[in-house]
Amino acid sequence: KRLDLPVLKGESKEELEAYLQKFRRLATLLEIPKTKWAETLAIRLTGEAMNVFNRLPWTSINDYDALERALMKRFLLDHTYFQGKFRSAKQETGESALEYLSRLREILNKWSGIWIAPIRKPNAMPMPIEM
């Protein structure tokens, strides 16, 4: 299986965040072993993102989580960024309530640093999120 994802060209927080999310989803969907994720991502990095990879210690170049943390740190995708993004999130035109909830969960996961299990039953009534 082949990951058909272009190189990362952008240098903004939003572009990196979207790229990493797309990468994780496609790598999971294509069942690429996580042990290959750092290598698979590294060959798609350019500019400052590639500089971040080049500055990783040799002992971490095969560690996807270390690479992602380093990228997020360099591009300031931190607690404050995700907190602001969560608090300012609004349901987009054409976005279903379930899609909105899923997007909020993604942001909250990144903000809090813990995994919140996704809703498994699309017809189930989700618990309201207090904001």
Image: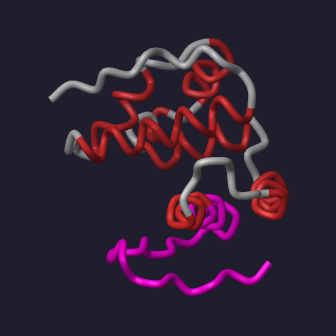
100 displayed left or right of 30: right
110 displayed left or right of 3: right
Image mark count: 0
- The correct choice, above or below, for 71 with respect to 126 in the image is above
Q: Is residue 128 magenta?
A: yes
- The correct choice, above or below, for 11 with respect to 19 in the image is above
Quarter that holds the N terminus: top left
Q: Is residue 122 magenta?
A: yes
36 displayed left or right of 67: left
Give percent across and percent down for residue 53. Answer: 55, 27
- The secondary structure that most of the magenta stretch takes on is loop
Give percent across and percent down for residue 50. Answer: 58, 19
> Residue sitting at 82 percent across and 64 percent down?
87
> Residue sitting at 62 percent across and 39 percent down?
17
Looking at this view, name the residue that lies furthest to the front.
94
Give percent across and percent down for residue 24. Answer: 41, 44
> Residue sitting at 76 percent across and 57 percent down?
89
Q: Quadrant of residue 71?
A: top right
Quarter that holds the C terminus: bottom right
Seen from the viewer's position, the closer of residues 54 and 46 is: 46
Q: Quadrant of residue 14?
A: top right
Looking at this view, name the residue that lies furthest to the left.
1
Magenta segment range? 104-131
